[in-house]
Amino acid sequence: MLTTDEKLRYSRQTLLSQIGESGQLALAKAKVLIVGVGGLGTPASLYLASAGVGKLYLVDGDNIELSNLPRQILFTESDINENKAEAAAEQLRQHNSHIDIEAIDEMLDDELCDYYFPEVDIVLDCSDNMATRYLVNKMAIKHQKTLVIGAATGFDGQCLVVNPEQADAPCYECLFPQYVDGKAQSAPVENCQTIGILGPVLAMIGGMQALQAIKLIVGLPVNVQQLNLFDGLSNQWQQFNLTKQANCPTCQA
């Protein structure tokens, strides 16, 4: 049962018939790993912490820079040069002292994935580089963990849910192959460092990642064969149905 304090704190979301007290209890038991605590990871973690997700693992080896502040909304000027995971964890504890938060102040690698992935229910990929995305995708398949992927540059964003337990569901590498004809694909020229990014676009995508995670935790349907694209200039969303690739080296291995 929810405590009196929890009933008051979460009253607006438990009023929703799709959440209710049972959904809130499910959130309290859930464990979510967030890879990357930057422009996507900060809004996503803030919404998940505020919603009452029982344990959050925050992974990021970077330190906070002045140029991060316009879009990485958990950080302030006093946090500059501090580790992102540690600083975010401290801020989130002030938002919700009833949940457990673990900061992992390292860059994600195979060893960390093998240790933490079995501990969690859902993984959020909020990273900003292709190498990490391929690693997280591979490890989500290996450990059979649902993965919620977000990305954004300029005024554009995208969100994709990967569920390895669904036999016909595509993975990230089905959509963006790491190798074509045996050759590694180069990283996109267009990224946040080359064309820029506007903070609210990241908030939209990070919020969508948090929403998808909450829906998954409480048992609401989520389409795992769909790429969602957001155009911040026209304020329009587009959805594209995806199919599993027969030659995908990750999910067909």
Image: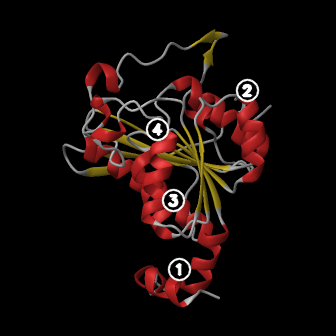
Number of dots carrying numbers: 4
Q: Nearer the viewer, mark 1 or mark 4?
A: 4
Tag 3: amino acid: Gln
Q: Give the mark, 3 or 2, whose residue is nearer the N terminus.
A: 3
Q: Earlier in the sequence, mark 3 or mark 4?
A: 4
**Which quadrant, please, contains the C terminus?**
top right
Front position in the image: 64 or 238: 64
**Helix, strand or loop at mark 3:** helix
Mark carried by residue 249: 2
Q: Secondary structure at mark 4?
A: helix
- Please identify, in this view, whether the residue under mark 3 or under mark 4 is nearer the observer: 4
Which is nearer the N-term, disc 1 or disc 4? 1
Q: Which mark is residue 212?
A: 3
For image coordinates 33% across by 27% down, the residue present is: 192
Q: Which residue is mark 1?
A: 19
Please rate how many residues cluster around mark 1, counting C-alpha atoms within 10 Å: few if below 14, some from 14 to 19, many from 20. many
The three-letter code of the residue at mark 4 reads Lys
| Rendered image quadrant of residue 30 | bottom right
Give the residue type at disc 1: Ile
Q: Amino acid at mark 2?
A: Pro
Query: Which residue carries the number 4 mark?
Result: 84
Q: Tell me where residue 23 sits by quadrant.
A: bottom right
- Spatial separation of the CA atoms under disc 3 and disc 2: 26 Å
What crowding class fits label 2: few (fewer than 14 Cα within 10 Å), some (14-19), or many (20 or more)?
A: some
Question: For the residues marked 1 and 2, what is the alpha-carbon distance in whole angstroms?
Answer: 38 Å
- Answer left or right for 39 relative to 33: left
Q: Which x, y percent locates residue 121?
A: 69, 57
